[in-house]
Image (tube, grey):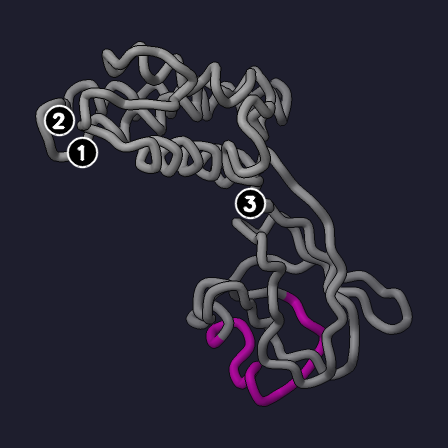
Amino acid sequence: MIDRELLSELQLVLIEPPDGGDTWPSGIWTRAEVLDALNAGVRALVHDTHLLVTRVEVAVLAGATSVTLPADWLATGYLVWRSLTNVRSPLGPVDGFESDLALPGWETAPGVPLGYADLDSQTLTLRLVPTPAANGTLEILYVYRPADVLAIAPGAALPVAEEFTSAVKYVALGTLLRKVGRLLDAERADYCDRRYQLAQVASTIILGGWS
């Protein structure tokens, strides 16, 4: 589905003349607000289902207390520490509390990284646990932020496959229907949330298969 088709669907639901999202005569929403809601829907689906994943390698120096993540990072998928001798160690997510319990003194006693913490640091950074004692490479699979709808040119394909567009649609509708104004409709917005949850589960099954 192309972006203008989905925008027209939103207009029909919101009782606006469908024209590919170009105009919103009611004045309740602006075009910018609708595009923000649509892009938020794309990012929510991508983040929640790990729909779009890419790989990058980051060189890490011994004693590094912070690793900078890619600028388009949305969520961490899978991390592996690779030593200079090509020994690879999978890393699991931890927080400061877990690290202190499992490895007391991990911040001052370097070693081979066993985990990573990306919730206790600044945005777009993570910390290896324990601090690496030698240089190495961090292999990262991460969910990346897709290009915004209409960012390239009108009439472009959405950054997600056809099977997943309903999830994007319902996130956007839920956001728009919660705007304080004449058409504030919490009941319909809650319905949209449930439809998104259903689409999210279906998307997860499609991506991972039945088990």
Q: Earlier in the sequence, mark 3 or mark 2?
A: 3
Q: Which residue is mark 2?
A: 184
Is-magenta flag for residue 12? no
Residue 112 is inside the magenta segment: yes
Identify the element where label 1 is drawn: loop
Q: Which segment did they paint magenta?
A: 100-114
- Report which quarter residue 193 is drawn in: top left
How crowded pointer 2 is (Cα within 10 Å; few <14, some 14-19, many 20+) is rated as some
The spot of residue 142 in percent (x, y) is 63, 49
Q: Earlier in the sequence, mark 2 or mark 1?
A: 1
Task: Indicate the secondary structure of the residue bearing disc 2.
Answer: loop
Circle 3 residues within 10 Å: few <14, some 14–19, many ≥20: some
Query: What amino acid type is highlighted by mark number 2?
Result: Leu
Horizontal relation, residue 66 to residue 45: left or right: right
Q: Residues within 10 Å of mark 1 (few under 14, many from 20)?
A: some
Distance Cα–Cα, label 3 vs label 2 = 30 Å
- What amino acid does circle 3 point to? Arg
**Marks 3 and 1, how far apart at CA:** 25 Å
Q: Main secondary structure of the magenta part?
A: loop
- Residue holding disc 3: 145
- The residue at the point 65 percent across, 81 percent down is 64
Q: Are marks 2 and 1 in contact (CB under 8 Å)?
A: yes
Left or right of residue 33, residue 111 in this image: right
Give how far across and how far down residue 43 sits, in percent: 47, 39
Q: Mark 3 or 1 closer to N-term?
A: 3
Residue at 18% across / 28% down in the picture?
28
* Residue 207, horizontal then vertical, whole percent: 62, 25
In this orientation, which residue lies closer to the viewer: 5 or 42? 5
Quadrant that contains the C terminus: top right
Kindly identify the residue that appears in the image at 24 percent across and 30 percent down.
Answer: 29
Q: Which residue is mark 1?
A: 179
